[in-house]
Image (cartoon, helix red, strand yellow):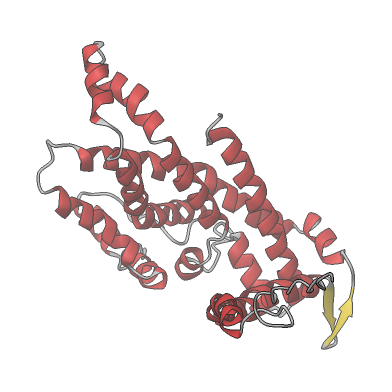
Amino acid sequence: MTALATPARTKPAAGGPQGTRPPRLTARRLAPYAFVLPALLLFAAFKLYPIAWSFVLSLHKTVGGVETFVGADNYTRLLHDPLFRTALGNTAVILVVQVPVMLILATGLAVAFDSAALRARSVFRLGFFLPMVTGLVAYGIVFSVLLNEEYGLVNWLLGLVGVDSVPWLVDPLWAKISLGLALTWHYTGYNAMILLARLQSIPGELYDAASVDGAGPWKSFRHVTLPGLRPALLLTTVLSTIGTLQIFDEPYVLTRGGPDNATLTIGVYLYQNAFTYFDFGYASAIAYALAVLIGILGLIQFRVLGDRK
């Protein structure tokens, strides 16, 4: 008599008879997303939505209080707008003249702050970094008072040595110089600290090897310091470029973009179109054109100054 074969018992699927995941495991997997969700919602509400709506606005024009779809007309208008070209040219002058001067000064300060021959280095570092802590509007007002043609402290000091009063904020050329001085005073120390942080990470053995090979201070700076500072120089160049192209507070507080549009920047012109003329469509088109310009210049800088490997 043959024994009947008993059917093999199948093992229940993990997580329950129906193969579902345990509730605890599912909750653990979803917990990180629950913590991130508030930040994502805030980012979407206050970043993504304004960016998307700004693009929609750039395709419209306000006519009689009604938003009318005009397609790419606002972008075409940019190409034929003389004031936009003026603002673009003024911003380019600041970018080409003031930014290199500022970064050269910042590099020199970083080297000085790292030198053992400088006593009380912490005091000097703090003193040069403090301007960055000052609010943009606050220091703009201070400079507007200092550079006032009639009762400014700077012209008073120049008068003590027999120098005539300088029209710092009312002459087109001097207004640009005043803006450059204010920007240099405010941002040089900040960039110097970034460069100093990178400078302190360069191994001292490289300087010892260069000294053994007969390199003097200048050759050591050229062949050891500058190559070592390359990543920090790229960072400060990109940050300074973005900041310069977006500059608004300083020219608005100092000169309101004048005299004769001499300090009219893209940021000031965007503000004027949005909140003076209430042409939000054209202002949005300016903002997107500025974003594209920043992206192009950033890519060029990474190609030129980035690691070629």
Q: Is residue 128 left or right of residue 104?
A: left
Tell me the residue at 22%/40% (across/down): 114
Residue sticking out furthest to the left: 119
Front-most of 209 and 3? Answer: 3
Numbered marks: total: 0
Q: Residue at x 40, y 45 (%)?
A: 102
Q: Residue furthest bottom?
A: 65
Using the image as rendered, state which of residue 33 and residue 128 is in the foreground.
33
Mark yes or no: residue 98 visible: no
User: In terms of depth relative to the viewer, which is nearer, 225 or 155?
Assistant: 225
Residue 144, percent from left and from top: 38, 67
Q: Where residue 115 sits: x, y (%)?
A: 18, 37
Quadrant location, the C terminus: top right
**Relative to 309, residue 144 above or below:** below
Residue 108 seen anywhere in this rendered image of the structure: yes
Question: Does residue 309 appear to the left or right of 146 in the view shown?
Answer: right
Q: Height in image: 18 above or below 115? A: below
Residue 36 quadrant: bottom right
Looking at the picture, how far across and down is residue 89, in whole percent? Answer: 63, 50
Give the side of residue 3 with respect to residue 101, left or right.
Answer: right
Q: Residue at x 22, y 52 (%)?
A: 125
Residue furthest top in the image: 214
Rendered position, 209 above or below 299: above
Query: In the picture, which quadrant includes the N terminus?
Result: bottom right
Residue drawn where x is 44% and y is 61% of the image: 169
